[in-house]
Amino acid sequence: MSSHMQTGRIEIRPNALTALVEALASGAIEVIDLTQPLSGKTPIIQLPPPFANTPGWKTHEISHYDERGPAWYWNWFEGGEHVGTHFDAPIHWVTGKDRHDVAQVPAGHLIAPAVVIDRVEEARRNPDYLLTLEDVRRFEREHGPLPRGGWLLYRTGWDERASDQQAFLNADQTGPHTPGIAVDCARWLAEEAPIIGVGVETVGTDAGAAHSFDPPFPCHSFLLGADKYGLTQLANLRSLPPTGAVLIVAPLKLLEGSGSPCRALALVQR
Ligand code: MN
């Protein structure tokens, strides 16, 4: 029989959604916005020649309570699929070319638990810092296994640079220097870990120097090839606990899209 309580003739059924709504209203559950603002100033990735680059974001005004539309304000926009806080679908990489595009990603995957591994100090000392398998193992010893069907969010403090293209890409004559994930760790996260994806604060899930790794861009290559996802340019990871947050990710349902700018929100118990 069901486990709901019975009080006289009034049945009180525990309802998870009602409890959630009440917790949101009372502040017991807080909503943290993990999204960077999207505008013409949003930093974008810069690939070296001979590769083609993405345009940034651009907004065009249609009318602004004026003769073009006296009572309404609206714009149209153009921009790359991989601009700002965005979602990488498996089809983005050649290793995932037969897998899901962004519109095919199951809706149920867009709400999922998340854990946060913090390597801010390491990345501050070394902008080329790579998350190691031992880092993840140490996290698991302290906090338990990575969440099944959830996200690993990798905090490096890079979001502090997100309003400055130059500081964000941190490039010199040897190329960009931004933190990422070591090759063997990326392979393990793709092939062994129970997660559905990896989220980062940097311009992409791979390190700035990952063009020189074997294989190049291991996060993209392994994760997307394993039908997993990427999430980039996240903000406010400092406001999340190491475990227990729930991530809501909402990429546009672009048919055959390789990814999409998205809103990323976290629910956190206070
Ligand atoms: Mn991307």
Image (cartoon, rainbow, N blue to C red):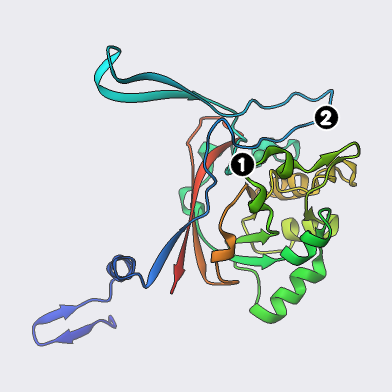
Q: Quadrant of ligand 1?
A: top right
In the current view of this chain or complex, which residue is farthest to the top?
67
Which amino acid type corresponds to the residue marked 2 in the rendered image? Pro
43 left or right, relative to 260: right
Which one is nearer the viewer's eye here, 30 or 216? 30
- Label 2: which residue? 48
Residue 32 vs residue 134, the one in the foreground: 32
x%, y% of residue 128? 84, 53
Query: Residue drawn at (8%, 83%), measured in percent from left and top?
Result: 9
Q: Position of residue 122 (x, y in %)?
A: 79, 64
Does the numbered disc 2 mark a residue whose Cβ is under 8 Å from ligand 1? no
The mark that comes first in sequence, 1 or 2, is: 2
Label 1 or label 2, whichever lies nearer to me, is 2
Residue 22 in view in this figure: yes
Q: State the image coordinates of residue 254 (x, y, percent, origin top left).
A: 50, 32
What element does badge 1 sit on? loop
- Determine which residue is flagged by label 1: 89
Q: Quadrant of the N terminus?
A: bottom left
Q: Residue at x 52, y 71 (%)?
A: 244
User: Left or right: 24 with respect to 251?
Assistant: left
